[in-house]
Amino acid sequence: MKVLLIIRDIDNSALGLVGKSLIKELSKVVDLDVLYSNGETNVKVDNVNKYYRLKYPTIPIRLYWGVMKVFKCSLFDEIWARVGAIIFANKKSYDIIFDIVSILTLDSLLLGHFLSQRLEVKHAVYFVDAIPAKGWSYNINVSNTLKSIVKKTLPSADYFASCNKKM
């Protein structure tokens, strides 16, 4: 089975640590490629076929959150994910797209969503943290925007998992 694992960060963050562990274990049982956007691939696992980097642009944080508050959408994430899906769709064929996401890395969820639609393959999503509860963010518009991204993409996922029983 050919699997493309999409993760934003391969580093020592919670997302990166979970990702490294999953990459290590999945690479033992499937034909695995990894697509990441930030960090370095210092986690080289022998069984991973290829690491691809689709760099996420540096956007001033005030601009990023300001656009999200005003327009009630994650415009930069949406553009990056759509362009990335177009670029990456011609690289290789896969049986499944597997996303490892955090509530603050929904750009990779969007990329997996658009790429699975473009390639017409299954889409699996693994959340390493909770989908935000009411009042999670400092700004209700940001929280609502993050929830709306999850609401529009998650129903089309073929598989969904979260990291603990509370979620």
Image (spheres, rainbow, N blue to C red):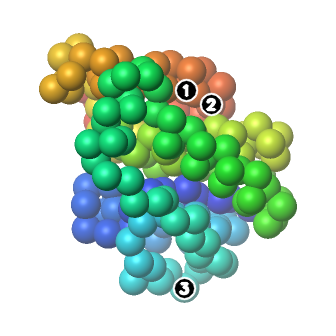
Residue wearing tag 3: 46
Please report contact status of discs 1 and 3: CB closer than 8 Å, yes or no.
no
Question: Looking at numbered disc 3 in the image, what kind of residue is underneath it?
Answer: Asp
Nearer the observer, 120 or 3:
120
Please report contact status of discs 2 and 1: CB closer than 8 Å, yes or no.
yes
Q: Quadrant of the C terminus?
A: top left
Nearer the observer, 55 or 1:
55
The residue located at (54%, 85%) in the rendering is 46
> Crowding at label 1, few (<14), some or many (≥20) Cα neighbours within 10 Å?
some
> Disc 1 to disc 3, how far (Cα)?
31 Å
Q: Secondary structure at mark 3?
A: loop
Q: Earlier in the sequence, mark 1 or mark 3?
A: 3
> Disc 2 to disc 1, how far (Cα)?
5 Å
Q: Secondary structure at mark 1?
A: helix
The residue located at (36%, 41%) in the rendering is 64
Question: Looking at numbered disc 1 in the image, what kind of residue is underneath it?
Answer: Leu
The residue located at (83%, 61%) in the rendering is 90
Question: Looking at numbered disc 2 in the image, what kind of residue is underneath it?
Answer: Ala
List x then y, in percent, for residue 72: 42, 21
Residue 57 seen in this snapshot: yes
> In front: mark 1 or mark 3?
1
List x then y, in percent, for residue 4: 65, 59
